[in-house]
Image: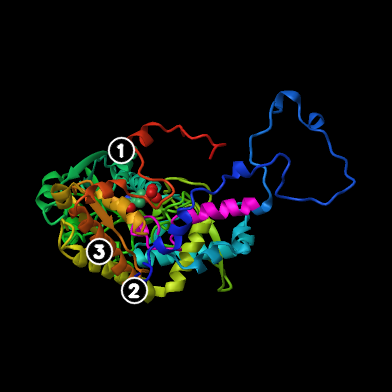
Amino acid sequence: MSPPAPGGRAQSAPLMGRAAEPTIFELSAPGRRSWQLRTTDVPEWPAEELVAAEHRRRAPVPLAEVSERDLVAHVTRLSHRQYSVDLGAYPLGSCTMKYNPKSCDTVAALRGLAGVHPAAPASTSQGWLALLVELEEALCAITGMAAATFQPAAGAAGELTGLLLMRAYHDAHGQRRRRVIIPDSAHGTNPASVSLGGYEVTTVPSDDRGCVDMAALRGVLDGDVAGIMLTNPNTLGLFEEDIEAIATAVHEVGGLLYYDGANLNAILGVVRPGDMGFDIVHLNLHKTFATPHGGGGPGAGPVAVSERLADFLPGPRPVRVPEDDGTTRYGREMPPRSIGRVHSWHGNALVLARALAYIRVHGGDGLRRVAERAVLNANWLRVRLSSTYDVPFDRPCMHEVVLAAATLKRRYGLRALDVAKCLLDEGFHAPTVYFPLVVEEALMVEPTETESPQTLDALAEAFERIAAAAAADGGLDAAHAAPRTTPVGRLDEARAARTLVPTFDARGG
Ligand SMILES: *Cc1c(COP(=O)(O)O)cnc(C)c1O
């Protein structure tokens, strides 16, 4: 047998196969408890005396009654069924779940940070305010912007904030502009935010290089354009080479440039949106800066802007206050022409603490290395897999490579979805599939900076094995039966989307 793949297979497959384990409800026995309290002489109060009859349940909640030992085994067993970023590669990448240094979590859990109430006066939360000011300066240095707000709680919230800033800026110049331009490859939140912000979407197509079609862009630019929203690298993982020409053309008609910096993994410390000509940038700290996007926890989508937009930022903002004696105090300040609050306090603060820890752990040169390795890893996979999969835009990519199963589908019937399910049996998490929408049978692979050459090699081998197996006799049927090693097999997607009510009995497991 070959050595175990650095993916998840070696660690999780043996546990996943044990289907015969009793459920926690089968272990349940009436009156069994997972806690013990010492006997005291405090009399037990009957529930009837404490809670009025109309507020009491008629029957107890049907919960499992088990010992602490069985409860811990149950929860631990469930945790082993879960594919984890700590166990194996996650080619969904930084956009969902990149591996991050554990030291960042340690910082976010510090009692001195986690225990502070956001309403505490500035005089007793100087440390927090100093941290926020330092983070703002770091993010401005990384993006080439002048000032930032931390309030937006997610990327989409940052986009809406950015569009409100765009509107405030044009209003201040007495201009009513109605349209915002978006390329056809954009993330779905972009057009949604434009509509929410009260603007109309004008779409520009991508050209055959996968970049904004300059001629088409010039064709839609006029005095009615409030701005353009771009991601660079774009969602095809490609760098917009004409970005300077785009910036000049948009600025010439009085529009602003909005940078969707949800994912900064590709450009950290290498290029800055401000130097490309952008006026507004949002960052997803829950993608690039140490908080995972997956898992549904809180996020942070700070918005950084150039000098001419700083006065419109939401507030109050944490600021340095110079004292007469030469020392510095930290306080909060409302920008003079602020659009107002977009979130309570300073947003999701512990995500911000984690981001500053990430930036400080790496330092400027370390952040650059993150980007360089992320890009190198994606390009290594692009070249290696170009003989088995389609590479729709076969030129150097950035932090992610868009592959496609279009040819495999035509030849053998193997779809991107099948490849994704087969990868689960190979011990890897699946990559993003069917996005970007402009690519047929798309498989968007983002290996991230932390994977070793051995892991990349194992991932590439898995991709190759899946393609080769589809060509063999009966290969397609086997692919359609995947995944077979996971606790749940192939789902009926249409039914799963339409029937949101779970059809299993929670007590039966
Ligand atoms: C993830 C993402 C968003 C949206 O961010 P949320 O925090 O999920 O709202 C926007 N644009 C791009 C390019 C993204 O990748």
Nearer to us in this view, 120 or 111: 111
Q: Residues within 10 Å of mark 2 (few under 14, many from 20)?
A: some
Residue 224 x/y as whole percent: 20, 41
Residue 211 is left or right of residue 156, and the answer is left
Residue at label 3?
398
Q: Are marks 1 and 2 in contact (CB under 8 Å)?
A: no
Q: Residues within 10 Å of mark 3 (few under 14, many from 20)?
A: many
Name which quarter of the figure residue 373 lies in: bottom left
* Amino acid type for the residue under numbered disc 3: Met
Q: Answer with mark 1 or mark 2, whichever residue precedes in sequence.
A: 1
Q: Residues within 10 Å of mark 1 (few under 14, many from 20)?
A: some
Q: Which residues are magenta?
A: 70-97
Q: Which SS class for mark 2?
A: helix
Residue 196 is left or right of residue 334, and the answer is left
Furthest-top residue in view? Answer: 54
Please tell me whether residue 71 belongs to the stretch shown in magenta: yes
Residue at screen point 57% across, 46% down: 22
* Amino acid type for the residue under numbered disc 2: Arg
Q: Is mark 2 within 8 Å of ligand 1?
A: no
| Real-space Cα separation, disc 3 to disc 1, in angstroms | 29 Å
Residue 195 badge: 1
